[in-house]
Image (cartoon, helix red, strand yellow):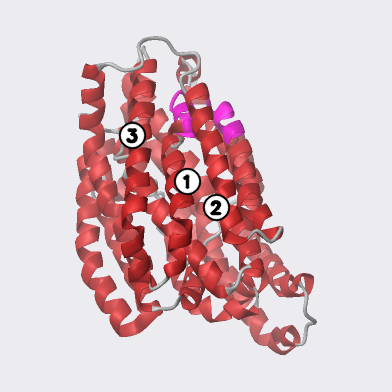
């Protein structure tokens, strides 16, 4: 963000600046969503489970090995006069991280395949190693633009990258090339992203590619957050690895569908949190940090009006949702899916972004340490005693503990010498209350609809359009109920969206 935009902050909300990123993610969400939906129909349950296991390995390394260095750009670039060294040393570090990831995949995939009881993973050893290497190397692409305030350029990159990624994963399978063809395609895609990262990220900046003293500062800042990620990602994925080790690939496919969520959380939470981090950095630089709590409440309040109804609808319409998107063979995943939607509710408060923006990364590490300690016994007992349902419940409980441990640290991060905050001061209670009431009432309407239409839905013909009809009717009823209750409580949804778009 430019100095001019920073000086106009009182008239322009940071939520408006997040608009290009949100719209870009919204446009590509349909393409991204098509990946698991198409693969669920063209692959067998065994192949579908193998697909999820391959990308579970890649994404675990993708989030652990950056060690917080890429995310540190949100802290340093808004404050830096000379930006190129920060970008250059980040790109160099991530290239090395990619090489380490490839070596780990090549050397350890055999052990993982044995744990999963799925030797088919070894057929993709080489392509998985290359894919993971280039994926890590290209991690800084969008973040390098957003952290410089170039949100429109970042949005364009999101548009192009997500569209090409979806095509690379879906088209080979539709043409009959299977997982092998898909893995070759995504290797090509990530290689192009890696090249684009080196071309786009440092463009328009000056200075050396790296400075030893700046690298030390960056590493010191990133280390606590990186260590937190080293704990958090294995912790978050522990239930996935544990379940994969005790069930067949076909049952694992059901479990992953149960854990599936539409990309709405990432679509809205990530750009909002990113722009909030940059905004807090600007406010600190301008000596106006006391305005930070208002920015946080604004973000959380607007996310509440979106995430609470989304979670309530998914819970109420879970059978219609799973049946329409994945087919009747995945309906046994409905109970697991209903537990997993708790993750949407827990994303309302962008707490980690605040702590990173204020340099409180040790608090993030402590939170993830607590969550990791809680997860180990929960997952072990949950999966061993209660199977797949125990796995998802243990994950949900651990996530709740982690969010609570973050929440207690946010007031101190937003406080100033003249403004001491408590937890009750940072939460948008009015927005949470109205959104909860409207979402609960609308969800109750969906349950009543199912009771009245259960026999009619069961008699519908086969085919995608007929499968989506119950979901569409439930969605329309929920939307009318939610909007109606909001109006009754004095909230005007269209006005709310308009103000977010304008930045008012």
Which residue is disc 1 drawn over? Answer: 131
Task: Give coordinates of residue 309: x percent, y percent.
Answer: 55, 61
Q: Is residue 275 magenta?
A: no
Name the residue beneath numbered marker 3. Answer: 96
> Is 250 left or right of 393, judged from the image as shown?
right
Magenta extent:
141-157
Q: Earlier in the sequence, mark 3 or mark 2?
A: 3
The local secondary structure at tag 3 comes to: helix
For mark 2, does the 10 Å Cα neighbourhood hold few (<14), some (14 to 19), or many (20 or more) residues?
many
- Are dots 1 and 2 in contact, CB under 8 Å? yes
Query: Measured along the vertical axis of the image, is residue 204 above or below residue 24?
Result: above
Q: Is residue 492 visible?
A: no
Q: CA distance from mark 3 to mark 1?
A: 14 Å
- Which residue is drawn at the image coordinates 72% and 70% (left, top)? 468
* Residue at 48%, 22% in the rendered image: 1
Q: Secondary structure at mark 1?
A: helix
Residue at x 61%, y 54% (from the top left corner) = 181
């Amino acid at each position: 963000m430019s100095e001019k935009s920073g000086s106009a902050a009182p008239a322009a909300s940071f939520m408006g600046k997040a608009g290009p990123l949100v719209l870009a993610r919204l446009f590509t969400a349909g393409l991204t969503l098509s990946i698991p939906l198409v693969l669920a129909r063209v692959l067998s349950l065994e192949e579908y489970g193998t697909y999820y296991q391959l990308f579970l390995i890649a994404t675990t390394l993708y989030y652990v090995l950056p060690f917080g260095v890429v995310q540190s750009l949100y802290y340093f670039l808004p404050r830096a006069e000379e930006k190129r060294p920060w970008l250059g040393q980040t790109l160099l570090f991530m290239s090395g991280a990619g090489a380490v990831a490839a070596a780990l995949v090549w050397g350890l995939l055999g052990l993982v395949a044995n744990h999963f009881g799925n030797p088919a993973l070894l057929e993709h050893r080489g392509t998985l190693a290359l894919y993971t290497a280039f994926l890590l190397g290209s991690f800084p692409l969008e973040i390098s633009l957003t952290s410089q305030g170039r949100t429109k350029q970042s949005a364009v990159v999101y548009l192009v990258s997500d569209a090409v990624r979806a095509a690379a994963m879906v088209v080979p399978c539709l043409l009959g090339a299977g997982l092998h063809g898909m893995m070759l395609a995504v290797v090509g895609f990530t290689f192009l992203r890696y090249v684009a990262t080196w071309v786009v990220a440092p463009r328009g900046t000056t200075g050396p590619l790296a400075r030893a003293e700046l690298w030390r500062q960056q590493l010191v800042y990133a280390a606590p957050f990186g260590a937190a990620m080293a704990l958090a990602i294995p912790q978050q994925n522990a239930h996935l690895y544990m379940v994969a080790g005790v069930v067949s690939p076909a049952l694992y496919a059901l479990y992953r569908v149960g854990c599936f969520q539409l990309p709405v959380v990432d679509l809205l939470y990530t750009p909002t949190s990113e722009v909030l981090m940059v905004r807090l950095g600007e406010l600190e630089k301008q000596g106006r940090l006391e305005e930070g709590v208002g920015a946080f409440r604004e973000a959380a309040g607007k996310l509440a009006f979106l995430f609470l109804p989304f979670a309530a609808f998914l819970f109420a319409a879970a059978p219609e949702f799973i049946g329409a998107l994945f087919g009747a063979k995945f309906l046994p995943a409905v109970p697991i899916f209903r537990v997993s939607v708790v993750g949407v509710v827990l994303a309302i408060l962008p707490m980690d972004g605040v702590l990173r923006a204020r340099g409180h990364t040790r608090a993030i590490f402590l939170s993830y340490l607590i969550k990791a300690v809680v997860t180990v016994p929960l997952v072990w007992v949950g999966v061993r005693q209660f199977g797949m349902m125990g796995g998802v419940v243990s994950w949900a409980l651990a996530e709740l503990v982690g969010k609570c441990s973050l929440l207690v640290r946010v007031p101190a991060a937003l406080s100033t010498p003249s403004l001491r905050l408590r937890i009750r001061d940072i939460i948008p209670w009015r927005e949470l209350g109205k959104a909860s009431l409207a979402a609960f009432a609308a969800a109750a309407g969906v349950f009543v609809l199912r009771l009245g239409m259960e026999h009619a839905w069961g008699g519908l013909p086969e085919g995608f359009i007929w499968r989506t009809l119950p979901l569409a009717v439930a969605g329309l009823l929920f939307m009318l109920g939610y909007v109606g209750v909001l109006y009754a409580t004095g909230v005007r949804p269209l006005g709310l969206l308009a103000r977010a778009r304008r930045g008012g």
